[in-house]
Every structure is written in structure tokens, then in C-alpha cells.
Image (tube, grey):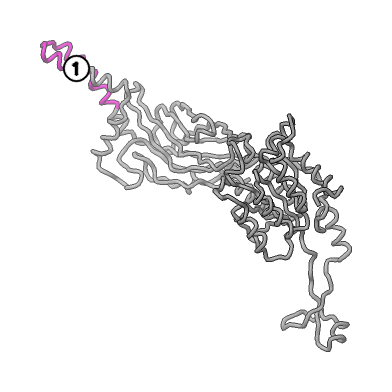
């Protein structure tokens, strides 16, 4: 996967303007530039030296402030007591941190920073590697540099590195790993450099402006190749046989239009209708599937990476990826009626190089909704432009009687409907300790009576096993 350069901002104080798109900003690393403390401001060009010097004095460490306070106190005592030797000691103690501030303030060098994130999209509970590269693009060697990259707390502790003297034109490379149990989009950066003097009297922090984004997507589980009963032709080998029987071109004549190729003229139809008719190509319809994800907050108890909602999100991602590989056009629909954006009409996405990433990125940031029912999803299915939605697979939370009836009516627009309940009934099924109460089994019975193949699921339940059970139930006619 290719990585482009990250955006960069003007250099930090003390640095001459350094572009992130020049020879140092190009390539696989995201680039930024920062410099030593000086008179150039990050955003407003060249401020007054008095303001910049005030910032430099603000970087005094505890040691530097202690030396300065001790020197002032010794000088006052020497003046009161008339001790010249104590005055010399006080002046030395007070001047040392001031000299360190001035030296660090007058330091003139430029440092370019680069970051490479590999990969930029990673499943939850997997690691990504971040490589950092620092280059000294000035003619002076740097002092001791403390490098720190800002990362969200969910990705782990903030990485810190200590770099020794970097020679002119030299570079240093370090790396660290990040890992998250929670899906989402997390910014990495900006990179920070902390400059210090040899005595530790003063520390100044300069920040780069470039950052990268790590996308943590739901984990995808491999599913077995099972043919669910009631699916349209277009699944696996059945679709290939349909194409072989129908041929690449179905001969359906239509009236001649200006610009049509005369080699397409169908003479038998022309003689029958008394007007010029041409053949037109019509490909067999591609199988479709709508994946419905229930995101209602009230339907999923608990939170965290092992919650029922996260199980439903990961299961929806697994089904979407599996069906795309099998040649389906897939649409992701939520209880609010919103579908994943796509180039095709109706939100259906075909298997392209960007489809899988688009769906995974959508599922990486999906959150709970405040809807009370599933009427939004029902209206979206009922308002479809096609007469039949093909296969319908739903991942649902807790359902009451009215919501179960709404889901049952969705069956009318699909050839086959399969529901996985990740609510309380699904948790009882996953635990295996005892059967769920009758009130929690009622939604399963209602969906089966409406024609769904309904199965309980939830954390601790293998989606691959449920996928095979759904295929077995459809073969035996269960849920009809």
C-alpha cells in the first residue's frame, strides 16, 4: 500500500521556511519541519524578539529556576553581609541558567521530521508500526534531542526517544508500535522535539504540524462457502452456470436508433415487426445483498470490545467481505435508514479495489444511534428502486413485540432473510449455561413465523458456526 506525504506547516521558531513537498518531504514518509528556537514564528512569520525571548525563559527547568533563585538569594545575602566571595558565587549561580537560555535561544538549525505508518488500516487487536525519521538539514550539529510523538491513550503509552548529537546532514530513525482493542480513527502526531542544554537548565519544545490517521477496523472472520436457500442465481458456481447457459449476449431486439451499429441488425425481428430492429446486450442481473446493522443504544447492553454491539459490527464486516468475494453487490444499512455511500445507485457496492476499504472504514466509525425502533430501516427497504432486494442479512439487538413485527415485514422485499440476534437471547446461547427466558425467545419465534431464518448470537459465539447453521436451517426449511 502506498503512502503519500503528510501535510506540513511552516517551521517552528528558529527555522528557515522548509517545505514538506520538497526533496525532504517527498516519498513514503509524511513530512514536517521544525527548527531550533529563534525569531521565526510558526504562523505569523517573524515576531518581535522580545516575545520569543520570553518564551525561551519560560522553558527554564526546575533545576534552572533553582539555580536562578539560589543565585539571587546569595547575591542579596552577600550585599547585606558584605561578603564578596558569596557575591561571586551568587552571580555564578544566577548567570549560568541565563546563559543557557540565551545560547539555546540563539541556536540556529533546522530539523525535518518524517513519519511512516504501516499499515494505515489495521484490524482491532492488531499492531501497526510507526517509523520516525529525523534529519538535520542545517549546517550546524544539534544538541541533545528528545523526540516525542503524540498518540491517543487507547493506542498505548506516548513514545519518547532520546537522540544524541546529529551531525549536519545526518539522520536518525526510530520506530514504535501501536495497538488498539477499539475500532475507530485515531490521529498520530504532531511530532514534538524537546531541545535542552548540556546542563539541563532549559528545555524548549517545538512541534511539527504533520500528522497521520490510523484506522482501526472491525476484525473480519473467514466464513465457509455455504449456499443459503432462496438466494438468487449469482452466488458462486451457480452464477457461472447461469452465464454459461444464457450466453454473454441475450438476444433481445429493440427499435433501431440513430448511431446504432448496422451489424447489430436482427433481420428476423425486422421482418416480423416491419421496422428495423437491432440486438441489444443484457447481462444477467448480479445478485444483491443488504446487510442490516442495528445500532440502537437501548438494544445492546454493555460496552467495550467484548460487548454485543461490537460483536454485531464485526459480524457485519465479515459478512460484507465474504459476500463481496462471492460476487455480490452489497449494501450496508443501519436502523436509521442510512446506507454506506457508494458509486452505484441505491448504495449497493460491487467488488472493486476500494469497496472493501470503504465498507470497513464505515464500520470503523459507526456508533450507537438514539432511535427507538427500526422504522427507518423498514422505510429504506420499502422505498427501494428495485422490486426485490435479494438476500437480506440482519444483525439485531434486543427486540420487543412491535419491533419484531417491523423486522418481520422486511422479509417481503427479499428472496431470503437471515437474522442474527446479539441481544440477551444471544448471550444466553453463547454462555450455554441455561436456556433463555420465554420473553427473550419470543422475538426469535416471531421472526421465524414471518419467514426469517433467525439464530441467536453474541460475544463468544463463532460467526462461522452460525453461518453454517443458517445454511442448514434453510436447507431443512426452518424459519419459513
Asked if the magenta segment contains residue 81, the reply would be yes
Q: Quadrant of residue 41?
A: top left
Residue 76 drawn in magenta: yes
Camera-side residue: 277 or 198?
277
Q: Is residue 253 above or below residue 31?
A: below
- What range of the chain is rendered magenta? 75-100
Instruction: Using the rendered image of the protein, determine whether residue 350 is visible from the camera's viewpoint.
Output: no
Label 1, on which residue?
73
Above or below, 464 against 475 in this view is above
Look at the image and tell me in which quarter the N terminus lies: top right
Relative depth, front residue between 476 and 444? 444
Q: Residue at x 86, y 61 (%)?
A: 242
Picture layout, residue 2 above or below residue 427: below
Under tag 1, what secondary structure? helix
Residue located at (62% from left, 53% from top) = 374
- Chief secondary structure of the magenta portion: helix
Query: Horizontal placement of 412 versus 357: left or right?
Result: right
Count of numbered circles in the view: 1
- Picture coordinates of residue 309, whole percent (x, y): 62, 41
| Residue at 34% over, 39% down | 14
The quarter of the picture where residue 117 lies is top right
Is residue 342 or residue 30 the one in the foreground?
342
Where residue 366 appears, as percent x and y from the top left, is: 58, 46
Residue 464 position within the rendered picture, expressed as x and y whole percent measured from the top left: 77, 40
Q: Is residue 195 left or right of residue 456?
A: left
**Near-viewer residue (278 or 141):** 278
Position of 43 compared to 177: left or right? left
Q: Count neighbours of disc 1 (C-alpha within 10 A) and say few if under 14, some if 14 to 19, many if 20 or more.
A: some
Q: Position of residue 414 (x, y in %)?
A: 75, 58
Residue 158 seen from this side: yes
- The single residue placed furthest to the front in the displayed view is 438
Amino acid at each position: 500500500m502506498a503512502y503519500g506525504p503528510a501535510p506540513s506547516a511552516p517551521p517552528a521558531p528558529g527555522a528557515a521556511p522548509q517545505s514538506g513537498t520538497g526533496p525532504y518531504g517527498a516519498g513514503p514518509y509524511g513530512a514536517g519541519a521544525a527548527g531550533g528556537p529563534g525569531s521565526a514564528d510558526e504562523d505569523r512569520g517573524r515576531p518581535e524578539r522580545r516575545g520569543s525571548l520570553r518564551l525561551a525563559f519560560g522553558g527554564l527547568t526546575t533545576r534552572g529556576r533553582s539555580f536562578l533563585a539560589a543565585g539571587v538569594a546569595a547575591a542579596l545575602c552577600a550585599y547585606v553581609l558584605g561578603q564578596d566571595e558569596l557575591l561571586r558565587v551568587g552571580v555564578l549561580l544566577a548567570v549560568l541558567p541565563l546563559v543557557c537560555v540565551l545560547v539555546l535561544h540563539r541556536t540556529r538549525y533546522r530539523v525535518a521530521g518524517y513519519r511512516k505508518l504501516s499499515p494505515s488500516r489495521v484490524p482491532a487487536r492488531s499492531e501497526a508500526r510507526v517509523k520516525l525519521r529525523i534529519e538535520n538539514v542545517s549546517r550546524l550539529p544539534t544538541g541533545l534531542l528528545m523526540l516525542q510523538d503524540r498518540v491517543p491513550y487507547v493506542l498505548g503509552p506516548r513514545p519518547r526517544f532520546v537522540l544524541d548529537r546529529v551531525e549536519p546532514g545526518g539522520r536518525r530513525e526510530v520506530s514504535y508500535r501501536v495497538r488498539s482493542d477499539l475500532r475507530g480513527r485515531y490521529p498520530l502526531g504532531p511530532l514534538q522535539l524537546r531541545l535542552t542544554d548540556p546542563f539541563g537548565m532549559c528545555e524548549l519544545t517545538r512541534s511539527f504540524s504533520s500528522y497521520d490517521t490510523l484506522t482501526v477496523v472491525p476484525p473480519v472472520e473467514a466464513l465457509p462457502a455455504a449456499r443459503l436457500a432462496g438466494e438468487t442465481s449469482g452466488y458462486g458456481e451457480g452464477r457461472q452456470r447461469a452465464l454459461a447457459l444464457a450466453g454473454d449476449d441475450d438476444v433481445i431486439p429493440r427499435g433501431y436508433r440513430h448511431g446504432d451499429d448496422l451489424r447489430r441488425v436482427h433481420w428476423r425481428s425486422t421482418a416480423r415487426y416491419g421496422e428495423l430492429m437491432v440486438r441489444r446486450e443484457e447481462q444477467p442481473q448480479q445478485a444483491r445483498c443488504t446487510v442490516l446493522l442495528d445500532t440502537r443504544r437501548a438494544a445492546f447492553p454493555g460496552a467495550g470490545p467484548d460487548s454485543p454491539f461490537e460483536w454485531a459490527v464485526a459480524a457485519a464486516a465479515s459478512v460484507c467481505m465474504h459476500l463481496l468475494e462471492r460476487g455480490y453487490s452489497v449494501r450496508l444499512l443501519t436502523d436509521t435508514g442510512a446506507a454506506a455511500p457508494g458509486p452505484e445507485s441505491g448504495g449497493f457496492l460491487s467488488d472493486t479495489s476500494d469497496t472493501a476499504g470503504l465498507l470497513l472504514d464505515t464500520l470503523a466509525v459507526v456508533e450507537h444511534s438514539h432511535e427507538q425502533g427500526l422504522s427507518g430501516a423498514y422505510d429504506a427497504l420499502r422505498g427501494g428502486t428495485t422490486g426485490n432486494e435479494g438476500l437480506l442479512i440482519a444483525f439485531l439487538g434486543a427486540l420487543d413485540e412491535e419491533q419484531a413485527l417491523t423486522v418481520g415485514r422486511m422479509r417481503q422485499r427479499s428472496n431470503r432473510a437471515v437474522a442474527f440476534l446479539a441481544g440477551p437471547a444471544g448471550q444466553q446461547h453463547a454462555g450455554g449455561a441455561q436456556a433463555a427466558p420465554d420473553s427473550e425467545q419470543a422475538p426469535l419465534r416471531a421472526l421465524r413465523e414471518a419467514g426469517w431464518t433467525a439464530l441467536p448470537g453474541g460475544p463468544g459465539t463463532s460467526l462461522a458456526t452460525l453461518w453454517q447453521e443458517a445454511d442448514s436451517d434453510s436447507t431443512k426449511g426452518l424459519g419459513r
